[in-house]
Amino acid sequence: MAFLQAAAKRANSFTGKRSRLPYLLLMPGMAFLSIFFILPILNLAATSTQSPAASGEIGSYVQTFQFSNYVDAFLESREQFARSFIYATFATLLALAISYPLAYAIAFKSGRWKNLLVVLVVAPFFTSFLLRTIAWKQILGENGPVVGPLRALHIIGQQTTLTASAFAVVTGMTYNFLPFMTLPLYASLDRIDPRTLEAAGDLYANGFTTFRKVTFPLSLPGVVAGTLLTFIPAAGDYVNAAILGNPSTKMVGNVIDSRFFRIVDYPTAAALSFMLMAAILILITVYIRRSGTEELI
Amino acid sequence: MADASTSSRGDLKLTRITKSYSDFNAVDDLSLTIKEGSFFALLGPSGCGKTTTLRMIAGLEEPTAGSIHIGTTDITTMKPYQRPVNTVFQNYALFPHLSIYENIAFGLRRRGIKDVKSAVDKALDLVELPHLADRKPNQLSGGQQQRIALARAIINRPALLLLDEPLGALDLKLRRQMQIELKWIQKEVGLTFVHVTHDQEEAMTMADTVALMHDGKIEQMGSPADLYDNPKSAFVANFLGQSNLIDGKIVDSDGDNFVVDLFGQKVSVLKSRSSAKDASVLFGIRPEKLRIQPSDADKPGNVLTGGRIVDVSYIGVSTQYQVEMPWGQEIMVFEQNDDGIPPLAKGDGVRLSWEPIFSFALDGHEDATAGSEVEVSE
Amino acid sequence: MSTVEVPVPTLPFGKRFTRWFGRNTIRIYAVVGFTYLFIPVLYTFAFSFNDSAKSNLTWVGFTFKNWQNPCGAPEVCDALGNSIRIGLIATTVATILGTMIAFALGRHRFRGRSATNTLIFLPMATPEVVLGASLLAMFLNFGINPGFWPTVIAHIMFCISFVVVTVKARIASLDPRLEQAAMDLYANERETFRRITLPLVAPGIAGAALLAFSLSFDDFIITNFNSGTINTFPKFVYVSAGRGIPAQANVVGSSMFFLALFIVLTGELIGRKRRKH
C-alpha cells in the first residue's frame, strides 16, 4: 500500500517545474525573522560572555568570552531557577487537573452547545491578562470576599494572607494558562469517535476502565500539546510573581527583568536567558521523545 | 494559447506514454488511439495506472516519456488550461463558495465569453436540474452534484471529456440510472468520452471500446463483447465476469480445432480462440456457458464427467453451482432458472457440457488467478 | 389492545439524588469550572461601575460615569490608543508575511523546508522574557532606543509564527483537486489563485489576523522590554497597579471582552447559517 499512497501524494500536489515562487514568498517573512529573531538571539549569546568595560560606565560592556558568566549567574540565581520550574510544574499539573474534566465535558457532554462552550472557555481571556491577574489579587486580598469567610471558618489562620504568597502566584499562573491547556485537550478529545467508547462498553469495560484504557490514551497528543503550551510560557513568566507574589517568590523572569532594567547587567541577564531557554528546550525534547508524539508542529 | 473550441479535434493518440516514479512505473510504455466521438472506457483494478493516464491526458500530471496528440496537435507539454480537455472529478470538486450557476459558467467565463446565461440554462436542462441554479454545492445530494460536475465540463464542448470514476460514490440504483443517462448524453452531444472505472459491468454497459489495464500496461483492448468472449490472458478472463481456467495440454490438431487433454478428459477449442504459446494451456470456459446435468444425462457438445456438487446457491435469476472435479478443482456453473426444473442438490454426481465454440485457451504458463478477486491486489 | 398500568416504583429521594449526581458529575463540574473562569471577568466588570477616585480597591458606590467618560483618566485612553495602533500595524504586517510563508510551506516543495518549519516554530517555544530581552539588547547595541516602532517590530516578530501555523492549517484542509478543477476549466495559475484558492483560504487568514491582534493587544512582557516610555494598555495596568488603577481601565477591559465575544459569536452564527443552508 505504501507506494500507492506515495504515488497518490505526488499525483495530488500539482507543481510541475521547480519554480522560484516559494522562495519569493518566503523571503520577506524569513528575512524579518532572521533580523529580528535569529540575530537578537545570536547577539544575546555574544552578550552573555561580555564583562564590564574598563571605563566603569554603567551599561557598557566588552566582549571577553567570559563563560564564567554562566556559572556565576547560575550560582546566584539557582534558587529562582528551581522556583520557576517548580511553580511551572505545579501550575501545569493543576491546569491539567482542572482542564481535563472541563475539556471532556465540552467534547462529550455538550450536544449542540459545543462550539459555544469552546468560545466561552476562551472568552474570559479577552479581558486583559493584567486586569485578570490584578482582579485575582484583589479578590484574594484583604478586602476581598475570600479571606474573610475563610478566616471566620478557621480554615486559615487570622494572620495568614492569601496574596503575596507562592500560593497566589501558582493560582494566578494556573488560571492564566488554562486556555492553553484546555483547547489542545478539547481538540484531542473531540477527535475521538464516541463509538469507540461504546465499543469499549460493549466489551465489558465500565466507565472508569473505558476512560483509563481508551479515552485517556487517545487524548495523549492533546495532553502533551497542552502541557507544553502551558509549561513553556509559565517557566518564563514573571508577571504573576510580580503582582501576586513577594520578594521570596521571585522567578527567573523577574531576575532577568531586574538585571536588564534596574542593575543594567546585560551579560548576566543574557546568560540567564540562555540557560532558561536551554533548560526548556532540553525538557521539551526529553518530554516529546518519551511521550512519542513527535509531530507537534 | 490554444482555445478549447478551435480545430484541435480529432482522435486522441497516446504514444509510448510512461509515468515513472523512483521505485515503479505507474504507466508503462502505453500507446493507444481513441476515436473521435466514441465512448471509451479505461478499466482496471486500483493501482493499474488508469487514473494516472487520465490525469496525463488532462494535463494534471506530466508524462516521463511519450507524447499525446489530439488530431494533429501535440498537447504533451500544454498546461491543463491550454488543453481542449475537461474533467469530471471523482469527488466532483465543485467550488464550494460559488453557486451552481457560477460553477457551471466557470469555464466559459475564463475563456472570456461574456454572455453565459443561455449556455448555462441549456446545460442545466441537459442534466435535468434547472431549479438548482442558485444553490450552493453543499446543499445538493451526491447524485445532483455529480450531474452538475458533468454539466460544468460539458458546457465547454471540449474535444475530450474525461470522467474519473464519476459514479463511484453513488448507490447502486442511482449508478445504474446515471450510466444510462451518461451514455445518452454522450450520443446527444457527440463528444469523445474517456471514462475511467474499476467496475467492469459499468465499462461494458457504457463503452464502445474498453481498454483493460494492469500494472501500467494495456492487457487487452476492444469492444466489450470482444474482451468478454475472447479474452487473451488470464487477467482479462478473470477480471471481466468469471472464468473457469483448467490446466491442460494440447495433444492433437483437428481441422480448425486443437484437442486439449484435461486430466485425462478430451475437449476441443477453436484455434482462432487460442492464445497458447506452446502445448501447455489454460483451458477456459465461462460458468454461464456450462450446462450441468445428472451424471447419466446425455446433452451434446464438449463434456467433462465425474463432477460432484459441493455447493448450491439460489440467486433468483440463476442458480450457482460449485462442482468438484476428479482432479480436485472446483468449477463454477451458472444455470439460468428458466426451465422450471428444480435445482440439483449438494452431493449429486454431475456431468458438464458446453458448446465448443465458447471455450478459449490461454498461455498455460500464466497465473490462473490473475485478475480474480482471490488475488490480493496491492 | 388494552394497556395495563404498571406501577413504577420510585426510589427514595436520597438515592435518586446520588444517582442524578453520579450521572451528571461532569456537567456539574463544567458549570463550576466555567464560573471559576469568569470570576475575574465579572469582578472587573463589576468594579467598572465603582465610583472610585483613583484607587479601585474597595467598593465605594455604583455609577455609570466611568462608562460615560472612559477617557476621564487620560492615561488610559492614551495607552489604549497605542495598543490599538501597534496592534493594527503589527497584525497587518504579520498577517501578510505569515500568509506568504504559509503558502510557500503549504503548497510548494522546496529545499530547506523542514529548516523553515523549525525556524517558524522556535519563537513560539522561546520564553517571552528571552524574546523581549534579546530584541532590546540588539536595539541598544545599534543605538536604537526602545519606543513605538521597536515595539511594533517585536510584535510582528512573535505574531508571524502564529499566523503561519493558522493559515497553513487552513491551506492543508483545502482540497487540491479544487485548484486542479479550476485549471482544467481554463483558469491559469493567477486566476486559479484569485478565484478559488484565496476565497477558500480567506477565513483562515481572517482567523489568523484576529489571533495576531489579540496576542499583540494583550502582550506585556515583550512590550515591557521594548516600549521605553510609551504605554500600552497592559503596561499601563501593570505600572499603575501600585498606585491605583482607574476604573476606566476596567471599562476598557470589559469592553474588549464584550467586543471580542461579539465578534466571535457573530462569526459562529454566520458559519452556522452558512452550513445549515
Image (cartoon, rainbow, N blue to C red):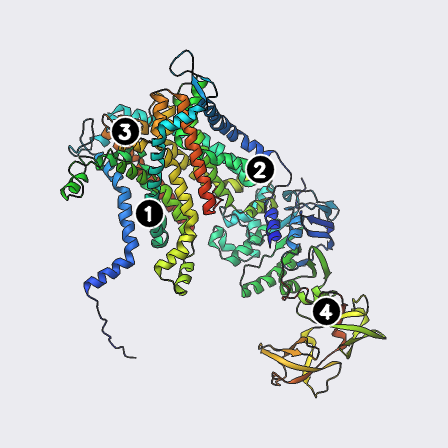
> What is the spatial separation of the Cα atoms under label 2 and label 1, in whole angstroms?
50 Å
**Upstream in sequence: badge 1 or badge 3:** 1
Residue B164: x and y in percent read 61, 54
- Residue bearing the label numbered 1: A97
Seen at 22% across and 63% down, the residue is: C15
> What is the spatial separation of the Cα atoms under label 4 and label 2, in whole angstroms?
51 Å
Position of residue C249 in the picture relative to residue B180 (left or right) = left
Q: Kindly report which numbered mark, 3 or 2, lies closer to the viewer in this rendering.
A: 3
Secondary structure, mark 2, is helix
Seen at 70% across and 88% down, the residue is: B296
Foreground pick, B68 / A281? A281
- Residue bearing the label numbered 3: A247
Q: Are marks 3 and 2 in contact (CB under 8 Å)?
A: no
- Residue bearing the label numbered 2: C190
Q: For the residue marked with disc 2, what is the amino acid? A: Arg
Secondary structure, mark 3, is helix
Position of residue A168 in the picture relative to residue B260 (left or right) = left
Residue A183: x and y in percent read 38, 45
- Residue bearing the label numbered 4: B229
Q: Quadrant of the N terminus of chain A?
A: bottom right
Secondary structure, mark 4, is helix
Within 10 Å of disc 1 (Cα), the crowding (few <14, some 14-19, many 20+) is few
Within 10 Å of disc 4 (Cα), the crowding (few <14, some 14-19, many 20+) is some
> What is the spatial separation of the Cα atoms under label 1 and label 3, in whole angstroms?
28 Å
Residue C92: x and y in percent read 44, 31
Q: For the residue marked with disc 4, what is the amino acid? A: Asp
Position of residue B131 in the picture relative to residue B271 (left or right) = left
Q: For the residue marked with disc 1, what is the amino acid? A: Ala
Residue C138: x and y in percent read 45, 22
Quadrant location of residue B352? bottom right
* Callout 1: chain: A
* Callout 2: chain: C
